[in-house]
Image (cartoon, rainbow, N blue to C red):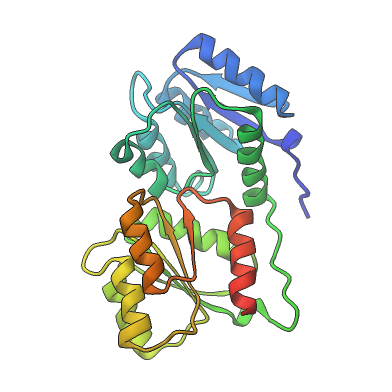
Amino acid sequence: MLHIEIADLSILLIEPSLPQLKLIQRRLKNAGVRTVEGVDTGRKALAMMERFVPDLVASAMYLSDMTASEVVLTMRHSSVLRDVPFMLISSETHFDALEGIRQAGVVAILPKPFGLDELRHALRATVELLDPKELELAHIDLDDVRVLVVDDSSTARHYIKKVLSNMGIGRIQVAKNGREAADILTNQEFDLIVTDLNMPEMDGLQLVEYVRHRMGNTDIPIMMVTSEQDGTRLANVERAGVSAMCDKPFDPQSVRELLARMIRS
């Protein structure tokens, strides 16, 4: 067992502004991190990661040579760096600008400026990914729990599947959209559905309505993991019969608690 603590994390920080880099390094030290390496461009960061794989990459959104989205997508397409946790530190709030980051599977998106509690929460989420704890549910063998993960983003599917696997869930199938999921559900039974909301062909809301009304299945728990911010759409999802919703990026501990409650029920 690893038993990783925040103090054990090695962090690569990408920040083009030297004053900001020093400030964030200081904040990380205050949060208990001992090892923080700083670079000012995406290319330098990727070159450094070829020699040394950090426990966490934290990056500003806009760099001189690329964006944080390009950095994390390059990592997600690397067999060595694919599962390295990534955290964005940025004052960017525009939905479209952040959507690629959210879909890539990140531990947190911290605003500038951020508080120490927010930083520690993100660092704890990183520790949870690196040193996961399995769900412990009385009278339930997690190896037998069947989960269908539905998301049109391959990186998001991989990230969610990894989080679920870390918790001890052994039987996970994936679908690229609601239509593919509906076809799978016609022939197979599952104990839990984890789905995105915004997808082509059949979105998450339509999938929930299909399961609850067309299939008449009111028992299977459905968790929606989404970056959607439209209150009306989210209200419609709740009315359709979703069991729980959580944001992208999500906190593994929060997902653990939601899963435990839904699987028990």
Residue 202 higher or lower than 39, as above or below: below
The quadrant of the image that shows the N terminus is: bottom right
Q: Report the side of 208 relative to 50 (left or right).
A: left
User: Residue at image x 31%, y 58%?
Assistant: 233
Residue 114 higher or lower than 177, as above or below: above
User: Residue at image x 71%, y 28%?
Assistant: 31
Q: Position of residue 8 (x, y in %)?
A: 74, 36
Between 218 and 253, which is closer to the camera in this rendering? 218
The furthest residue to the left: 201
Quadrant in which residue 164 is drawn: bottom right
User: Residue at image x 63%, y 62%?
Assistant: 256
Residue 222 higher or lower than 122, as above or below: below
The furthest residue to the top: 19
Between 178 and 10, which is closer to the camera in this rendering? 178
Between 244 and 18, which is closer to the camera in this rendering? 244
The quadrant of the image that shows the C terminus is: bottom right
Q: Position of residue 79 (x, y in %)?
A: 47, 49
Q: Report the side of 31 relative to 73 (left or right).
A: right
